[in-house]
Amino acid sequence: MNYRSEMIKNYRKYLPDLMEMPGFYEYAIQVYNYLEMMEPRKILNLQAEDPEKLKWLLVTVGAFIMSGEHWMDYEINDDWTKIRQTDMPEEFKVIIRRWKVEEIIEYIP
Amino acid sequence: MIKPEDIYLASNHGLDIILSYYPQAENCVDNRKHFKRRPDEDDASACLKRYDDCYKVTDFGDTATAMSPLDICMYEENIRFPEAIALLASRYNVTDELKRSVNKPDIRKRPATADEKEGARFFELCDTFTADQLRVLGPRVTQEHVDSLHWNVAKSISYVKNREVTVKSTTSTYPIFMRECIVEGGSDPEKVVKFYKIYEPLNPDKQWRFSYTPEGVKPKQYINGLYELKAAYRAFNQAEEKQFFNAPGNKDKAYKEQKLKEAFICSGERDSLCVRALGYYPLWFNSETYKVSPEEIREIYKYVDRLYNIPDIDNTGRAKGKELALRFLDIHTVWLPSWLSHFRDNRGKPRKDFRDFVELRSKNEDFRNLLELAMPARFWVKSWSERSKKETFDIDTSCLHNFLTLNGFYTLKDENTENVKYIHIDGCIVEQIKAKDISAFLKRFAFERYLSRDIRNLILNSQRTGESSLSQLDEINLDFTNYTADSQFLFFSQSTWEITKDGITAHQGQLTDGRSVWDNKVIPHKVSLLPDMFTYNVSQNAEGADLFDITVNEHKSCFFKYLINTSRVHWRKELEYGWENKGVDEAEKYRIAHRFDIAGPMLSPGEIQEQKLNLLNKIYAIGYNLHRYKSPSRAWAIYAMDNKIGEDGECNGRSGKSFLFKSFSKFMRSVNLSGRNPKLMDNPHVFDQIDQHTDFVLVDDCDRYLPIGLFYDSITSGMTVNPKNNKSFFIEFENSPKFGFTTNYVPRDFDPSTNARILYLVFSDYYHEKAAENDYLESRSIRDDFGRNLMTNDYSEEDWNWDLNFFSQCLKFYLDMADKGIKIQPPMDNIIKRKYKADMGANFEDWAYMYFAQEGEHVNKEIARADAYDNFLEFSKVSKSLWTMQRFTKALKGFANLCPYIVDYNPASMLNSTGRLLRKVGDTTKEMIYLQTAAKELGPDDFKPQEDNKDELPF
């Protein structure tokens, strides 16, 4: 597992410590809001010049994906460098809702 | 004693008094102009002139004598001099209050001599009273009267303590009186014990006015005046006996002792002296709470035919007067007239006792009139029938009605009905009853008092206990309003709480202002006042905005705990997210320690502030709703909604909103309407359960499409109720109920007109239901937090007491804020954001992000609104009837507010005077839209999104 997938998939491990860090919460809120307002099919590069900020970004994306039904509305590319707002049909969401989140995570490489 | 000069000094030399009666004289002050005292007079013949001490009016068309302001008051009000003094003193706030600096004895100390034993108390008496000292005791009291009751003036009273003698002496402003009290030892009238009652009537501290010396001699049961009454009885009979045997025919006959005509139980030393000054025999007790025994009453009746009681007419006096009248049915109660309390005494308090009465009405005739109205509670009379040669009983209707009113039975004045409304009053609680309930009470009374069968039959058979006679029972007009503009009364079974911004006062029994409550509005719990459960602070920031802070004190109110949790909008951060990948035990410990904490240490100051504001807003709203007073400037409905709202504008619910509203039904008469029906207001009889007694209407679980606007009229003005098969009626705004709404949807409008009518409440999702559609880890209900249901049958009286105290403290908080003109709305950011999202809908949002792309051609440029609208319709394939231009504009505003790169929508500088952006395009004028994007770069620490426009696989 590479660094990026580790940060995103296991965001729970890193989030509590980051929450203690000054500035993280303010930063994460911006990422959170941005992702939430992202228009369908739009893609965000998961990049940041500062390696610490990259960690913040990836952990926040991990937390974002797992909250609410974001895991259905957003997808991450194979090398964990981009996130895209999906355009999943409502009928498909209904089917997916019957699955358990934990089972789906197992399928994520 | 208040003198006319004191009143003139307070009323601009009496000019204010004259102008209050003759406002038309305003232009005649200090000139030669004349005025008419009555508008219908032909000539202006009165003039107003300043004399040495005051202004006076001389009417040359009348008596042509100069009338002082007091004369005018007496003439116009048709009252006597003392009443005029009292009336004007009360109007112009002139008091003769006792002052510690003036009303004090002369106290000196000296070393004790060898003869003066430690602890000894001795005194020196004056021979006679001065005129001033007599005036203190009563208006008609003379030396003869004080002598007859063994009163003396103490020149000084001394006591020895620590080998020092303290000498307390009478002064001209502080008389010390002493009464020689004689207790007879037994059958021998010569064998007596004496003690002195020391009376300092002008001591500003009322509790120190009386003391006794020597200590330990005063018996527990002692009636003042009884010794003097017995002496009078003996003297009377000696004189009568002498006269009897002087008559020639009585020489061989035995003299039968005769009783005195009457004696009076008075409520204090000065009252008793006033009674004595009128030529009667007074009796009085050493305290207001003295419980006179049946043996003592029997003893008194040995010497008098009739015993009167003159109670004070304050609340305690009335209660004690009623109690005595009902314990001893033969005692005649002399009720002082109620007008007496309209006058104020020298301390500015309502007049209440016999001395006050005599001060205003000092003639013997006035007292005789009072005696004429005095009645006993015994309502049956025994007489001897010569015809049947046996005792007969009859009912005295007047005494029967007196007996019933003493027991709290009245008829109620109700102008809306022809029928007689019978009521029973217990303290301040009023119960509507039927005439037969009164008959049943009389029957029960006769049994409980072991009255003879003749009397019991009389009660059952007499027409005087029938409905036609009872309908003439004393009529009473009661005030059932339980609020004023700045206070609220809560009536509990054993006490009444008066809540103001300054505090909560508990009253027992009848309220001083006669305020009453129907029994079905009484909160059926026993309560006691508890300390404040929260403290708050209101300050202002540099911009003048109000900043609120609350500190939760130690308390046991389950309701307050519930309210705290419904305000914890950041609970997940504190209880879940913050503990991921940390020790389970530690997390559990934190959860237990901060189960009901509004300011958990894991939250940032901003989050704590947000939660606190949510809590204060709820406390404020509870207080607002419990205050039954309706202010036109605070005509709001409470609107409760969830903080967490789904993307489609629907919330999960189950957050505890309805519980709060349903708790109001414990205090107020509530009507519930189901808001689930969006066509609720189409029903013409929608309010048919509401009447003028309804305090609160809850529209529960409102549908997304329920038009709240249709309720606005009912919120801000009165309401028309149209009951089925009945005539509709209108409830005035002041009496109409307050409204509350709960909804699981985002409100459709946040416009100023809505905000002015709504007091929002935001509920956290702390209480929630886990479902397939959400990511909650568990379901949590109010019951889970407390292990039982709140405010139900298994709630203990202690729980109720804490909660009722909390509600009262909410009221106090609200009244304080209302006084400062503050309305506390909850933090609305999240709600408003979601509301905009709901305004747009997913379809519009997709289109808008495309059409108004950040780098696109439709931003920072005027676009014809109709063109954008057409483009949207084409994109979304929706009909114009579904997406009207109005809805489109609203959605557009929502987008402009939410879109991170749009900073302004139709900038104010571009609008015309009517607030519209109109431009001439060709021959026609078109409405334009202008969306301005952000020009400024984000700061170095800000998140800089790097978007990727290549939608390439693999994803």
Image: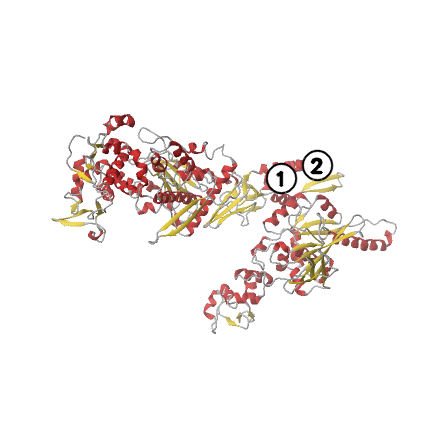
| Label 2 crowd (10 A; few <14 / some 14-19 / many >=20) | few
Contact flag, marks 2 and 1 (Cβ < 8 Å): no
The reply, left or right, for residue B862 in relation to residue B231 is left
The kind of residue on which mark 2 rests is: Ser
> Is B579 on the left or on the right of B52, as rendered?
left
Chain ID of residue with mark 1: B
Location of residue B947 (image quadrant): top left
Quick one: B871 or A109, which is closer to the camera? A109
Name the spot of residue B256 as percent of width and height, x first: 81, 49
Mark 2, secondary structure of its residue: loop
**Residues tagged by mark 2 and mark 1 found on one chain of the structure:** yes
Image quadrant in which you'd find residue B895 = top left
Asked if residue B686 shows in the view, the reply is no
Residue that label 1 marks: B465
At mark 1, the secondary structure is: helix
Q: Position of residue B127 (x, y in %)?
A: 73, 64
- What residue did someone put label 2 on? B452
The residue lying toward the viewer, choosing from B227 and B182, is: B182
